[in-house]
Structures are given as structure tokens and as C-alpha cells.
Image (cartoon, helix red, strand yellow):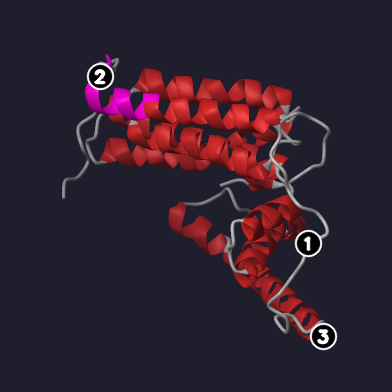
Amino acid sequence: MSMRVFEGFKFTKLNTPIHNMDPRAKFLTITVIFIAALLFTNLYVLVLILLVQLPIVFVAKSGKRWAASLKGGAMLAALIFIMNIITGAGMTYASSMTLRFLALLSSFSIFFMTTSPDDLGLALEQAHVPYVLTFTFTTAVRLVPTMAMDAQTVVDAQKSRGLELEKGNLLKRIKNYIPILIPLIVSAIRRSIELAEALESRAFGFSEKRQSLVTLKMKVTDYIALVISFVALITAVYFSLFVKLPNPQIPIEIPALWTF
């Protein structure tokens, strides 16, 4: 998977209706998309789920980073397609699983690139999630883009030293990534030690009672988004259980290379 995929998980502050949405309403909207993608294997529906997200990306003014995240996940999407073909699942099912992965990747990308970790932490706190868990989750969200940048820096440095990642067979390529993984692991350990020392110096966890300066409040647009999300969820569940949708059959079928 290319490091570009993490561009879609990096928050950038913009003044758009999507960025200004309450994170709780936004999370429910993305969750409905996530559930709908898991409910269906129909190609038409999965394409529709992917296309429904385009207006959200357009309003959020994040098209380039969204496209970069999908492009970065193209290798894993291709691997999902190939593995389904190898196991004899057929072209139609393999295409469905690939589209499902892209829809899920897109939904998570939209949420994280338009939601501030601070707002996400506030939403979790107001949902009465223990602060230790909230802090752990939001810290992980903050560190993912940072680790991705570190990884890209290490890759560029190793390539400048003559390391060839794209040449050789599969085993050779895996071995080529060892000089990249070792510096990344060392860097991650160093960051964790620095973070632990910083938390300890500030007496993290000494007081269980915390009071936030900002309190999240739902707006009219957030409630509208909640209603639309609930209607969409009920519709998706109904169609998945009681309506038989036509599914295009891709005529090209490749026999399984092995069976279990």
C-alpha cells in the first residue's frame, strides 16, 4: 500500500459545511455508509455507495487528498481482487469485494480528513468514554499521518542509497523492506518513550474529573444529517433483507488456481 493512502487520513482545517459538522453526526453518517457497504455485494449498489460520497468530498473541498488515498490503496484493492480470483470466487464477486474495500476506505478517509482530533476527543468525552481511552485513540489518530511521513522519509533516504524496492520477486521485495521497517520501529519506540515522559511530567491521570473549555452542540444541519442517515440505514437494511436486486454478471470466469 502506498504512503499516499494516509493523505486521506490527515486532518486539514477548512471552513466547509462538512468540516463544521458535529463529529457525532458525521460519524453516524459515515457509519451508515460503512454498514451499507457491508450489507451488499451487488455491484450496482456498491458503485452507488461509492458515488454517493463524491458530493461530500466536493463540499469538503478535499478531492485531491481523497483521490490520493484511493490511489494509495489501489495496490491493496488489486490484491483483494487477485486473491478472490485465485480462490475461484469469480469476476463478479471479486469486483464486488474490491468495490467494497474502496467504499470503506473512502468513508474512513472522508471522516478523518474532515474531523479534528480535538473535536473527536470532545465527542468521545461527551459520550462518557473514559478519558484514558479517548486520549489513546486521538493520539493514535494524530500519529498515523506523522508515521506515514516518517516512512516516506525513510523510503526516500534508502532509495537515495541505492535500495530498489520494485525489483525482484515477491520474496526479494519483502526483504527489501527490512531496511525501512527497522528505522520506523526505532522511531516509533523513541516517540512512545518521549510521549510517556511528557505525560508523566504533567501528572497524566492524577485527576479523574476533567472539564473541557469547549462543549459540542448539535446544530439544525446536524439533526437533518442524523434523520437522513437513519432513513438511509433503514432503507439499506430493508433492501438487503426483502428486495432481490439485479446483479450484473461478468461473463469472464477464471478457474481457481487452488482449492481449499
Numbered disc 3: secondary structure = helix
Disc 2 residue type (three-letter): Val
Give the Cα distance between marks 3 and 1: 21 Å
Q: Position of residue 80 (x, y in %)?
A: 39, 40
- Answer above or below: position of 244 versus 39: above
Q: Earlier in the sequence, mark 3 or mark 1?
A: 3
Q: Residues within 10 Å of mark 1 (few under 14, many from 20)?
A: few
Q: Position of residue 197 (x, y in %)?
A: 77, 84
- Answer above or below: position of 133 versus 78: below
What residue would you read off at disc 2? 243
Give the Cα distance between marks 3 and 2: 59 Å
Residue 201 circle label = 3
Q: Is residue 234 magenta?
A: no
Query: In this view of the protein, which residue sits in the foreground, 174 or 208?
Result: 208
What residue would you read off at disc 1? 212
Asked whether, in this view, residue 234 is left or right of residue 161, the answer is left
Q: Residues within 10 Å of mark 3 (few under 14, many from 20)?
A: few
Most common secondary structure along the magenta stretch: helix
Numbered disc 1: secondary structure = loop
Camera-nearest label, 1 or 2: 1
Query: Which residue is depicted at the point 50% across and 59% down?
Result: 174
Asked whether, in this view, residue 116 is left or right of residue 53, the answer is right
Disc 3 residue type (three-letter): Ser
Disc 1 residue type (three-letter): Ser
Q: Earlier in the sequence, mark 3 or mark 2?
A: 3
State which region is magenta.
Answer: 235-246
Query: Which residue is depicted at the point 42% across and 42% down?
Result: 79
Q: Residues within 10 Å of mark 2 (few under 14, many from 20)?
A: few
Query: Which residue is depicted at the point 46% across and 52% down?
Result: 169
